[in-house]
Image (cartoon, rainbow, N blue to C red):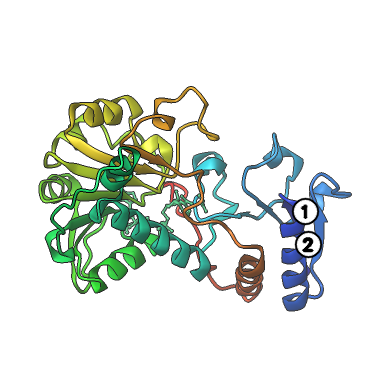
């Protein structure tokens, strides 16, 4: 089958991915949105977000490939059963997420917020240093990214917990699932990390209730999706001192609006959705590998369960 593919995204990435696909599938036809001469012949679209009315524009579409790990922006529940939805799984994404979470955990664990504040006052004051095993890091989401992050932190000696929808067994990690599992895990957490997908179930789940279940002085890292946190609740918990620090990479509105209190809050560190960025040089090969699997009639890596939403 010679695929007709439409790419919608930055030009440089498109050129790299077109080349990777051409090497693996010389017969494939590559079109760049919006230059698509025969939309009715298009088999698959590769995009971060879908163009308006895409499903009508491409009546014979068989697959949608997200250019990222997440698919919430493609509204999985609106995509018919006949169209496969495929997310990106790439070791380069996993490695970046490992270093993002590790550096964030270290920033909290080694008191860099505190020393930054002391520096502003030229205050030379030493504080007790905790050992990694004395710090309990809990990861929400034990999927492709969460599991790799949990394993790395565990290897470095942190006490690591993880929470997922289904029960899991992972060496060196205390795994929890379900609502009671979440409450039990939160009660023993020093640093809570979200690596959950955004679904109807995870939207707003880091709420006043959830934060109240954390011990006083716990911190939060969010590299999942912004809408998982209720911002007002997190800000209130930070202001009351119940939550010590927050390191946030993802936000309800991106770019984060200039007027947002996160920008100026002394206990909040903001990064502009850079925890794990799709690489032009590697991800095109993952796409090509998946197209080959599809051509052979095999299941592709990262096929999404649209009813579950991830
Ligand atoms: P994944 O492999 O699909 O893993 C998702 C994990 O979340 C699974 O362990 C799943 O549990 C768990 N989960 C989902 N819904 C749940 C629920 N209602 N209750 C409990 N656990 C639930 O996804 P991934 O590749 O690790 O990526 C996770 C997310 O990271 C993406 O969806 C995206 O939003 C975000 N992300 C952010 C960046 C960034 O730069 N900030 C970059 C890439 C990805 P089960 O294992 O039981 O199914
Ligand atoms: C980035 O947020 C991604 O989902 O890949």
Q: Measured along the vertical axis of the image, is residue 117 above or below residue 290?
A: above
Q: Nearer the viewer, residue 153 or 72?
A: 153
> Crowding at label 2, few (<14), some or many (≥20) Cα neighbours within 10 Å?
some
The residue that mark 2 highlights is 15
Residue 255 picture quarter: top right
77 left or right of 154? Answer: right
Q: Secondary structure at mark 1?
A: helix
Residue 220: where, in percent of width, then height? 28, 44
Residue at mark 2 to residue at mark 1: CA–CA distance: 6 Å
Q: Residue at x 16, y 34 (%)?
A: 242
The residue that mark 1 highlights is 11
Q: Secondary structure at mark 2?
A: helix
In this orientation, does residue 240 appear? yes
> Crowding at label 1, few (<14), some or many (≥20) Cα neighbours within 10 Å?
few
In this orientation, does residue 90 appear? no
Q: Quick one: quadrant of the N terminus?
A: bottom right
Residue 211 picture quarter: top left
The reply to whether discs 2 and 1 touch (Cβ–Cβ < 8 Å) is yes
Residue 15: where, in percent of width, then height? 78, 62
Q: Nearer the viewer, residue 116 or 69?
A: 116
């Amino acid at each position: 089958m010679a695929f007709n593919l439409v790419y919608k995204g930055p030009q440089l990435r498109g050129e790299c991915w077109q080349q990777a696909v051409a090497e693996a599938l010389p017969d494939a036809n590559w079109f760049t949105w919006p230059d698509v001469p025969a939309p009715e012949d298009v088999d698959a679209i590769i995009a971060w977000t879908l163009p308006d009315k895409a499903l009508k524009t491409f009546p014979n579409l068989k697959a949608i490939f997200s250019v990222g790990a997440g698919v919430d922006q493609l509204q999985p529940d609106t995509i018919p059963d006949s169209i496969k939805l495929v997310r990106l799984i790439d070791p380069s994404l996993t490695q970046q997420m490992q270093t993002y979470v590790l550096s964030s955990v270290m920033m909290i664990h080694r008191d860099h917020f505190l020393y930054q504040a002391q520096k502003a006052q030229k205050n030379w004051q030493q504080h007790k240093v905790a050992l990694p095993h004395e710090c309990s890091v809990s990861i929400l989401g034990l999927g492709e990214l969460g599991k790799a992050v949990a394993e790395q932190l565990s290897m470095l000696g942190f006490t690591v917990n993880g929470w997922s929808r289904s029960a899991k067994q992972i060496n060196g990690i205390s795994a929890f699932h379900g609502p009671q599992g979440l409450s039990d895990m939160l009660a023993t957490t020093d640093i809570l990390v979200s690596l959950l997908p955004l679904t109807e179930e995870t939207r707003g789940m880091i709420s006043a209730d959830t934060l109240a279940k954390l011990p006083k002085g716990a911190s939060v890292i969010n590299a999942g999706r912004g809408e998982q946190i209720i911002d007002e609740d997190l800000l209130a918990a930070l202001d009351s001192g119940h939550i010590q620090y927050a390191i946030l990479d993802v936000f309800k509105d991106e770019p984060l609006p200039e007027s947002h209190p996160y920008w100026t809050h002394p206990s909040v560190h903001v990064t502009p959705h850079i925890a794990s960025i799709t690489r032009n040089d590697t991800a095109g090969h993952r796409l090509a590998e998946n197209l080959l699997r599809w051509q052979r009639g095999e299941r592709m890596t990262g096929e999404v369960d649209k009813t579950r939403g991830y």
